[in-house]
Amino acid sequence: MPTKRLSVVVTRRLPEAVETRLTELFDARLRADDTPMTRAELAEAVRTADVLVPTITDTIDAGLIGQAGENLRLIANYGAGVDHIDVETARSRGILVSNTPGVVTEDTADMVMALMLGVTRRLQEGLAVMQGDDWAGWAPTAFLGGRIGGKRLGILGMGRIGQAVARRARAFGMQIHYHNRRRLRPELEEALEATYWDSLDQMVARMDVISVNCPHTPSTFHLLNARRLKLLKPTAVIVNTSRGEVIDENALVRMLKAGELAGAGLDVYEHGHRGNAELRSMPNVVMLPHMGSATEEGRIEMGEKVIINVKTFADGHRPPDQVVPAML
């Protein structure tokens, strides 16, 4: 008698190649449209599935996990960040959590550089003029931005993505500085030509550009709070492709309005998926709709990681990308 296939509920549309493979291997219930599941739909999914495949748009909190049926044994997240999942509660219920680390590293680092250049070279303002009808023509003093070569880049969070940003920024001639929970090994620090700062306050006060590349955890919530943002030079630029909650967004808006910061490049937001409304009207702010990892190659690789985690679990083994509370 054939073995019963795992029931796998996928909460959002995924690349076609990933969905096809999921249906080949499992009893996969796919999303018909690309809207987030409602709370009621998520509750039904956790009650009936063996495996849930959520994304960042799904809040898998203690209340939802409490409604899980006896069959739910794995939450195989499509994405590296798991701050939208209550990993501790899942563990207490005997439910494993996995993620997809590593595959978005290069794509996200590319976007950091794009945002950095977008702000410092005033690309948004140039695009707006070209899309309108009031460009009077080239002028020697028009749209003067700033060079990034020779500038000091402070990387907040020197994991995979932070290191990938450092490699790119070095190629642009930037000076690399970083703050991290743990200092890098000397040989890696030397290879990146990176200067470590134990004090985040001291680092941010001296940087020309800050790149936020740390995850959102209780200890990083508002790590760049109003007090710390005030330490930045008024000529400094902030780029955030990590999590919006790391920056006090309201304080950031106040400082940008007051001219106490030169600009910001944002792909993530603390307040909703569109960020503070005032940010959208600022010419020195470049805003993107969470596009940091949005490449076809990256999204397919994320799906492949999900499939490997679910297949390994189905075969009775520990998923290779299991997340445990001690990692957070």
Image (cartoon, helix red, strand yellow):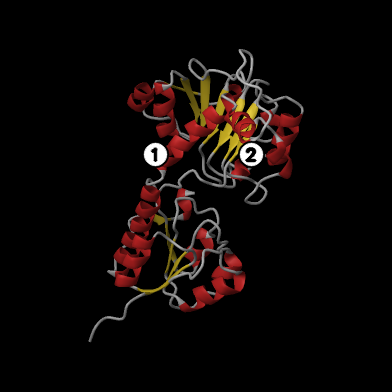
Mark 2: few, some, or many residues within 10 Å (few <14, many ≥20)? many
Q: What residue does disc 2 label? A: 247
Which quadrant of the structure image shows residue 320? bottom left
Residue in front for this viewpoint, 240 or 146: 146
- Which residue appears at 43% of the width and 77% of the height? 71
Residue 118 lies, in percent from the top left, at 55, 30
Q: Is residue 201 visible?
A: no
User: Which image quadrant for residue 222?
Assistant: top right
Q: Amino acid at mark 1?
A: Glu
User: Gap between marks 2 and 1, in whole Å?
Assistant: 23 Å
- Mark 1: few/some/many CA within 10 Å (<14, 14-19, 20+): some
Q: Amino acid at mark 2?
A: Ile
* Rendered view: 46 above or below 89: below
Residue 11: percent from left, percent from top:
49, 66
User: In x, y percent, where is residue 106?
Assistant: 39, 39
Report the disc number at residue 106: 1
Q: Position of residue 165 (x, y in %)?
A: 44, 31
**Quadrant of the drawing holding the N terminus:** bottom left
